[in-house]
Amino acid sequence: MPRSNRSRRRAPEPVEEIDITRVLSGTKRVESKRNGEWNVQPMTASVKTYTCPGCRLEIPARQAHIVAWRADGLMGEAEDLAARRHWHSHCWKIEP
């Protein structure tokens, strides 16, 4: 039987577009702490400087950190999101 010179490879599948803001900001998750449920989102880059509520030290711009806000607040999601805070990753882990 003669050999075929045609390629048997399939056409490449279309590549899904990557949302760069999602890649930079990380994946949101819900964590349980002693004082309730919290939405937690890792941040890899920011343009502002923040103050960590755990240690009261500065989180410089472009430093990886955590953003946390209540997941079980009584005032509604918009109020909880407005009250979000930026934490050092270590401070968030040790906060009771």
Image (tube, helix red, strand yellow):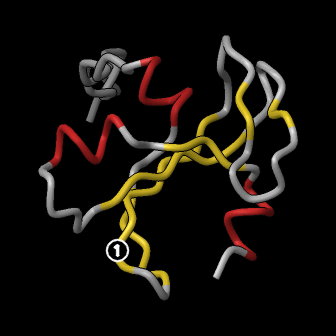
Residue found 69% across the figure and 51% down from its top: 53
Residue 7 location, x and y as percent? Answer: 34, 19
* 19 and 27: which is toward the camera: 27
Residue 63 to residue 74: above or below: above
Type of residue at label 1? Glu
Residue found 23% across the figure and 41% down from its top: 79
Rendered image quadrant of residue 16? top left
Residue 44 to residue 77: above or below: above
Image-based side of 86 in relation to 23, left or right: right
Residue found 17% across the figure and 47% down from its top: 77
Rendered image quadrant of residue 62? top right
**Can you name the residue that lies furthest to the bottom here?**
34
Residue 9 location, x and y as percent? Answer: 33, 27
Residue 36 location, x and y as percent? Answer: 37, 79
Give the quarter of the figure containing the C terminus. Answer: bottom right
Disc 1 crowd, CA 10 A, few/some/many (<14, 14-19, 20+):
some
Image-based side of 7 in relation to 47, left or right: left
Q: Which residue has dot 1 on it? A: 37
Residue 56 to residue 95: above or below: above
Image-based side of 52 in relation to 23, left or right: right
Residue 76 location, x and y as percent? Answer: 12, 50
Image-based side of 35 in relation to 89, left or right: left
* 34 and 32: which is toward the camera: 34
All told, the count of numbered labels is: 1
Residue 28 to residue 51: above or below: below
Q: Secondary structure at mark 1?
A: strand
Give the quarter of the figure containing the N terminus. Answer: top left
**Can you name the residue that lies furthest to the top here?**
47
